[in-house]
Amino acid sequence: MRRFALIAIPYFWLLALFLIPFLIVMKISLSDAALARPPYLPQLDLNEGWTGIKAFFSELDFENYIFLTTDDLYWKAYLSSLQIAAISTVLTLIVGYPMAYAMARADESWRPTLLMLIILPFWTSFLIRVYAWIGILSTEGYLNQLLQGIGLISEPLTILNTTTAVYIGVVYTYLPFMVLPIYSALDRMDDSLLEASQDLGCTRFSAFWLITIPLSRPGITAGCFLVFIPTLGEFVIPSLLGGSETLMIGKILWEEFFSNRDWPVASTVAVILLLLLIIPIVLFQRNEQKQREMDQ
């Protein structure tokens, strides 16, 4: 009973907050749009008994999934979102790994302060931080004023409402999610391994590449997932910093739900997006389990 109670809590959490909402969205994706409340049909009526249940399931179809394959807007949005999420993850890793490495190698008395500085942006609203970048990246913003003031540019740069602004916003927003897992992995690393490698003739770069990087791989993987997954469905940053030309699936999802009020198509988009995220994670977990079994 103790073991069952321990396992039941997280499973109940997943059932209540993931599986049941997913099944509801999945059902809506198999429905048809209608001018009703809620704006889709069919709707289950238990008062009709078994006949109503059979009629309900007979009216479900995959027309919305077929529709997504016929309209290039959606698959272009998926590809654009995958590209932006992948590039943003790589940029966040390039920026975050040196920060995590410096924190792990800093004096122990400084580490709490450095951790607080990394977490400090979470003390303010996410929306306010994104709006602040509008004032920094706009044509008359602080960045252009600084660059013109020191003589690096003669005319203001157009950064806002471009993909570059989206990359900047994503890297800034999700940088702590990359730094903290890598720092945790590096902090647990045994420094004697580096000393032993240098005694055996390894240069510092070789020791870093052959020892530090492999031992920090779990943190790198966790950080990449924590950045890539929310970026793929991001809506606020592309809307505020990217403008109308930035095509991401999160914006399409919002427009289908709230502008077009086409809940079935929006649910179909959400289901496919979720599958794009779950399948790589499951494959990665299976690969990691096989590697652990081979190591044993």
Image (tube, rainbow, N blue to C red):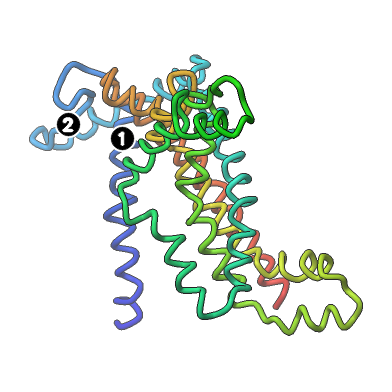
Is the C terminus in the top left, top right, bottom left or bottom right quadrant? bottom right
Q: Is residue 137 left or right of residue 129?
A: right
Label disc, if present, on residue 73 of the rendered structure: none
**x, y percentage for residue 257?**
29, 26
Q: Within 10 angstroms of label 1, few (less than 14), some, or many (20 or more) residues?
A: some
Q: Which residue is mark 2?
A: 52
**x, y percentage for residue 43?**
19, 29
Visible residue check, residue 238? yes
Is the N terminus in the top left, top right, bottom left or bottom right quadrant? bottom left
Q: Is residue 179 above or below residue 258?
A: below
Q: Is residue 234 above or below residue 252?
A: below
Q: Quadrant of residue 210?
A: bottom right
Q: Earlier in the sequence, mark 1 or mark 2?
A: 1
Name the residue nearer the viewer: 166 or 84.
166
Label disc, if present, on residue 27 of the rendered structure: 1
- Amino acid bearing label 2: Gly
